[in-house]
Image (cartoon, helix red, strand yellow):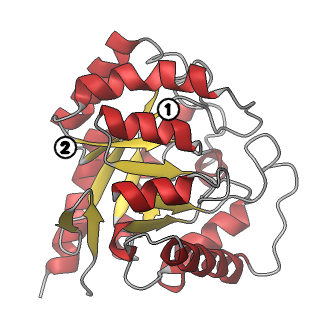
Amino acid sequence: MGVTLWKIAGEIFDLSARGWIMGVLNVTPDSFSDGGRFFQTPQALGQARKMIANGANIIDIGGESTRPGAEPIDVTEEKRRVIPVIKELAGETLISIDTSKADVAAAALDAGAKIVNDVTGGRGDDAMWPLLAKRGAGFIIMHMQGTPLTMQRAPTYHDVVAEVADFFRQQYACALKFGLDPMTLAFDPGIGFGKTLEHNLSLLKNLPRLRVNDRPLVLGVSRKSFLGKISGHNGSIHNRLLPTVAFTSLLRMNGADVLRVHDVEENVDALRVADALRSAP
């Protein structure tokens, strides 16, 4: 078992022995899983604090839905949604801002966020790279084929594992070119972001092939539709909890370092079980 370190705003964290849970907080009216439930700031803060109490290491706050078919929103509206929440939570835990806009990322970092989680992997806004080089925030580079509006229409790859791994290497090189500290980088294969069921499973089975220079791997499978296809529970998102928990343990055993989930308490338990097994002599 190798050593996996992640440098976030100057502090180095060791994810080798204990994986992390990232709690999803959608401050949106239209996200696929819980759109609207936490759109208002008091409800968002209540949910965030519940996730922190249940063991989340990071709260990932997003103000723009990236569900399949989602329309983009403007910078002003995105900041209006997320900045008050970040300001209230700053200092209580690590905060990640889920955005592909450099202006939103800058405002979030000013408000107390320490990580930027970009679904475009640095391709959405050219100003993102110099911002991150200057600030030293953690940066999660995700792979997505297409855009949220188009990504699930007809995803096609010759070899999805090789192509995602190539993308990670290219973005790693891009980060170095712009002067980012490579220790601040983490990578997410973007499960469900321009992928079929078969693509998703192939990526999840082959996580070791996706790792770049011992950088952390972030995985988000929580409540996604492919879990319904596997389990046969296509109707209700809440029937996808048990498949999500199963994947949390399996993916940790297969090399994932950070699991991005909606249901923190159950997935923390699953992660601790996997960590105990990984650490056993």
Label 2 sits on what residue type? Gly
Are the residues tagged 2 and 1 within 8 Å (C-beta)? no
**Position above or below: 178 against 2:** above
- The single residue placed furthest to the left in the displayed view is 281
Q: Which residue is mark 2?
A: 55
Where is residue 29 shown, x and y percent of the image? 58, 18
Q: Is residue 247 visible?
A: no
**Measuring 71% from the left and 78% from the top, which residue is drawn there?**
163
Q: Which residue is mark 1?
A: 238
Q: Is residue 2 visible?
A: yes
**Callout 1 crowding tier (Cα within 10 Å): few <14, some 14–19, many ≥20:** few
- Near-viewer residue (211 or 225): 211
Alpha-carbon span between mark 2 and mark 1: 20 Å
Quarter of the rendering occupied by the C terminus: bottom left
Quarter of the rendering occupied by the N terminus: bottom left
- Near-viewer residue (188 or 51): 188
Where is residue 270 shown, x and y percent of the image? 28, 56
**Measuring 48% from the left and 46% from the top, which residue is drawn there?**
222
- Looking at the image, tell me whether mark 2 or mark 1 is earlier in sequence order: 2
Q: Secondary structure at mark 2?
A: loop
Q: Secondary structure at mark 1?
A: helix
* Viewer-side label of 2, 1: 2
Label 1 sits on what residue type? His
**Measuring 26% from the left and 56% from the top, which residue is drawn there?**
9
